Image: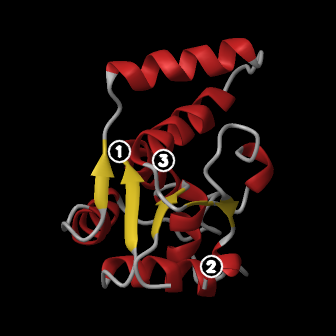
Amino acid sequence: MSGISVFFDTNVLVYAHDELSPFHEKSALLLDLSLSKEISGIISEQNIMELYRVLTNAAAMSGKPLSPSEAKALIQGTYLSGELKVVYPSNDTLIKTLEIVSRRRLTSARIFDVRLYVQALQNRPDYFITYNTGDFKSLGDIPVKTPDEIV
């Protein structure tokens, strides 16, 4: 497993912090492997925004949301500490995203999945990691896997 690179979908990051989730163990292990540099982890700034939204949402966090300051500390200490590569959208990201959603006639929130996958395409990881594999498999040539398939 050493030497591989993975691009995280936000759901994997959420499950890594949600100890009540049945997906917690494998998600947390994959995140830990990335933080310890045993594998190369890549995230987008979009992941960080989505993660904050979920971690501070009582409905999403089984009634135990983080406070804004707790979420900020977690994100800064874990995701902005330098162990993960954080990527940002470029003008090319936006153009490619709009091309794909227009060509495939995708609407509404699907644009966010496409934008995230386009950033993965621009960074060429070995795998795109998500529990929503069906949302991403037809978007490009990066293999889409669950954490269970990697660890």
Give the mark, 3 or 1, whose residue is nearer the N terminus. 1
Amino acid type at mark 3: Glu
57 versus 138 height, above or below: below
Pick out the residue farthest to the left: 82
Give above or below for 130 relative to 109: below
Task: Point out the image quarter for the C terminus.
Answer: bottom right
Which residue sits at x=58%, y=66%?
A: 12
Mark 1 element type: helix
Whether pointer 3 and pointer 1 mark residues with C-beta atoms closer than 8 Å, the reply is no
Find numbered disc 3 in the image and state the secondary structure of the residue it sits on. helix
Say which residue label 2 marks.
150
Residue shown at the point (65%, 82%) measured from the top left: 20
Q: Earlier in the sequence, mark 3 or mark 2?
A: 3
Q: Position of residue 72 (x, y in %)?
A: 27, 59
Front label number (3 vs 2): 2
Q: Which residue is mark 1?
A: 45
Name the residue type under label 2. Answer: Ile
- Label 3: which residue? 50
- 52 in relation to 6, above or below: above
For label 2, the crowd category at 10 Å Cα-Cα, with few meaning under 14, some 14 to 19 and many 20 or more, is few
**Rendered residue at 51%/21% (across/down):** 96
Q: CA distance from mark 1 to mark 2?
A: 23 Å
Where is residue 133? Give x, y as percent.
Answer: 75, 55
Colour basis? secondary structure
Q: Secondary structure at mark 2?
A: helix
Where residue 9 sits, quadrant-wise, is bottom right
Residue 127, percent from left and from top: 57, 61
Q: Nearer the viewer, residue 9 or 39?
A: 39
Q: Position of residue 118 (x, y in %)?
A: 51, 35
Q: Nearer the viewer, residue 119 or 23?
A: 119
Q: CA distance from mark 3 to mark 2?
A: 23 Å
